[in-house]
Amino acid sequence: MTTKSAPARPQHHLGHSMKPRQLTMMGLGSAIGAGLFLGSGAGIQAAGPAVLVSYLVAGTLIILVMWALGEMAAANPTSGAFSVYAERALGKTAGATIGWLWWLQLVVVIAAEALGAAGLLFSVWPVIPVWALALVFMVVFTGINLAGVRNFGEFEFWFAILKVAAIVLFLVVGAALLLGLLPDVASPGLANLTTDFAPQGLGGIASALFVVIFAFGGTEIVSVAAAETEDPEHSVGKAIRTVVWRILVFYIGSVFVIAAVLPATSGALASPFAGVLDAAGIPGAATAITLVAVVALLSALNANLYGASRMVYSLAERGEAPAFLSRLAGQSVPMLAVAVSVAFGFIATVLELLFPERILPALFQLVGSTCLVVWGSALVSQLVLRRRADREDIRLPLRMKGFPGLTIVGLVLLALIFAVGFSADASRVQLFSTFALIAGIALACALGARFTRRSSGAARRQHGR
């Protein structure tokens, strides 16, 4: 039997100037943001030290999802990524629904990261109000995303380098504190971890799980950026592998240090990294890490704005969004797609002015469970498309090991997370809201496709006359 090659890369007009090193650091940049620097404290408050269980569960799931996405992205790099894969595996309505759901998720995350970065900066420099700082951030990063993917990728690369270095330094200081190696500072030991590991029981772990999932959300942006990367067939695999293990080390290592140093009832969990460094007695370190956290959130905002604009661009190319969103300007940038993707971020700055300190917590609650649906679609799509490729003897440049077993493990884990989520009051409301949103998007996509088919048919009939 003759072995076929994977489907050819779709012909689109986006550039291919992103470097593999930029792709790798972009994956880190999109994931190490508000979820780690702000959400980790909220997770510990919800579950106590048992939040580590939440991180391990979510971490295992994201590894499997990224492996599945890596296989599909290497074979078919496209700016629509998992939306396109869902369309090919499950149909046009499914693909459009996943694409719009992820776009809406990122639109909310962009606003959350702008407000989160502004709030942190205001805590050390209380001169310009939070809403005004967030507005400045939105303007600056809109400009960066309009400057072309090469400039965007380089900017994101150095942003990510800075925050990775800061987290490594934080882990070193935290380890020294826990081991009693810092002069004139008493080590808290592991008492905070062992005294009351799960004060809220399973319900607390479930509540924290959705905070943690929000933290890992955005990692999948690597599969979107593959479409504009040099030699994506080879660079995607490397990016997937490095992003996964680095995120697990950074996240689980950082949360372990925070949970060991700060009790679950500590007010310092509002800014957990600064709280740990204050406990270590390092002068000025808390302010420094707060500024790094600002950079981290802005880096994630930068990457997520890129991802949102490319997804809505892909939807427009496929006829699932208004056609004008697929127009490209200089440097092959979808300017109008960028514009609609930042609009809610600007609206959120106005809402922050009207309702101070109430917008960011509300935004955190909106997007946690949407990540689960997107990840689930990726696993199901990979299961269908891999079996189809094997059946048709199509050669894939990157193959997920342990197939189909590990893909099924991911789906089972996902089902268990949903089951646990429905058992807790807080997460149950979030899940019902997410499924209602999905139903609304799917209905709109189905009706839109039906209207488009009717309009096209009527135009063809008129032309035939």
Image: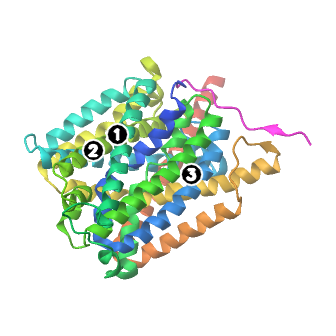
What residue occupies the far right of the structure in this picture?
1
* Location of mark 3 (residue): 66
Marks 3 and 1, how far apart in space? 24 Å
Q: In the figure, residue 210 lies in which quadrant? A: bottom left
In this picture, residue 311 sits left or right of residue 456: left
Tag 3's secondary structure? helix
At label 1, the amino acid type is Leu
At label 3, the amino acid type is Met
What is the number of the mark on residue 292? 2
Circle 3 or circle 2, nearest the eye: 2
Label 1 with label 2: CB-CB less than 8 Å: yes
Say if the magenta span includes residue 11.
yes
For residue 207, above or below residue 69: below
Quadrant where the C terminus is found in the figure:
top right
Considering only order in the chain, which callout, 2 or 3, is on the residue closer to the N terminus?
A: 3
Determine crowd level at label 3: few under 14, some 14-19, many 20+ residues with C-alpha closer than 10 A: many
Q: Position of residue 272 (x, y in %)?
A: 25, 60
Q: Which residues are magenta?
A: 1-14
Q: Position of residue 170 (x, y in %)?
A: 32, 53
Q: In the figure, residue 183 lies in which quadrant? A: bottom left
Q: In the figure, residue 165 lies in which quadrant? A: top left
* Location of mark 1 (residue): 162
Label 3 with label 1: CB-CB less than 8 Å: no
Marks 3 and 2, how far apart in space? 27 Å
Label 3 with label 2: CB-CB less than 8 Å: no
At label 2, the amino acid type is Val
Q: Residue at x 42, y 28 (%)?
A: 154
Considering only order in the chain, which callout, 2 or 1, is on the residue closer to the N terminus?
A: 1
Determine crowd level at label 1: few under 14, some 14-19, many 20+ residues with C-alpha closer than 10 A: some
Say if the magenta span includes residue 332.
no
